[in-house]
């Protein structure tokens, strides 16, 4: 029987960055991901509320079916996890966050 992912650690396949700034996470995602979206603090993904100090990028890599997901843990700081995508993950992130990033990019240009 599949275990429910009530905690971020049950979803992770690898930790890419530990105890880093949001800027470092965003730069890493921009460099390594073909697609990314701005994720607000408190965004819910697979039933887990993603804790962040401020909005950060979540990266999608459809070619390898992976997601780069930042999380801020109170005792450990900000980390970047690599997660294997499941059916519907990409479409969920795109539909939930896609419009928000487009609006933000228009304001910045």
Image (cartoon, rainbow, N blue to C red):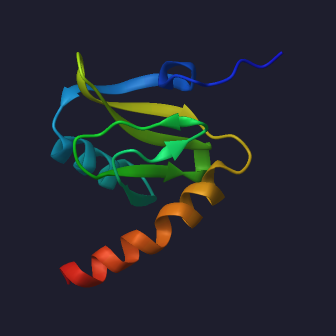
Residue drawn at x 58%, y 66% as measured from the top left: 95
| Residue closest to the far right | 1
x then y, percent, for residue 97: 47, 63
Seen from the viewer's position, the closer of residues 26 and 45 is 45
Q: In the picture shown, does residue 104 fall above or below 20? A: below
Q: In the picture shown, does residue 74 fall above or below 34? A: above
Q: Quadrant of the N terminus?
A: top right
Left or right for 39, reference 85 = left
Left or right for 97, reference 71 = right
x then y, percent, for residue 37: 41, 60
Left or right for 108, reference 87 = left
Seen from the viewer's position, the closer of residues 34 and 23 is 23
Residue drawn at x 54%, y 42% as measured from the top left: 45
Quarter of the view holding residue 73: top left
Quarter of the view holding residue 65: top right
Number of callouts: 0
Residue drawn at x 78%, y 19% as measured from the top left: 2
Q: Quadrant of the C terminus?
A: bottom left
Residue drawn at x 18%, y 31% as measured from the top left: 20
x then y, percent, for residue 19: 20, 24
Seen from the viewer's position, the closer of residues 99 and 48 is 48
x then y, percent, for residue 56: 29, 50
């Amino acid at each position: 029987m599949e275990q429910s992912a009530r905690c971020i650690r049950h979803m992770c396949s690898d930790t890419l960055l530990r105890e880093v700034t949001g800027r470092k996470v965003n730069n890493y995602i921009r460099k390594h991901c073909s697609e990314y979206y701005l994720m607000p603090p408190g965004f819910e993904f697979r039933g887990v509320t993603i804790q962040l100090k401020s909005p950060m990028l979540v990266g999608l890599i459809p070619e390898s079916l992976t997601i780069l997901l930042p999380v801020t843990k109170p005792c450990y700081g900000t980390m970047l996890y690599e997660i294997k995508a499941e059916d519907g993950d990409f479409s969920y992130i795109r539909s939930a966050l896609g419009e928000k990033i487009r609006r933000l990019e228009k304001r910045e240009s």
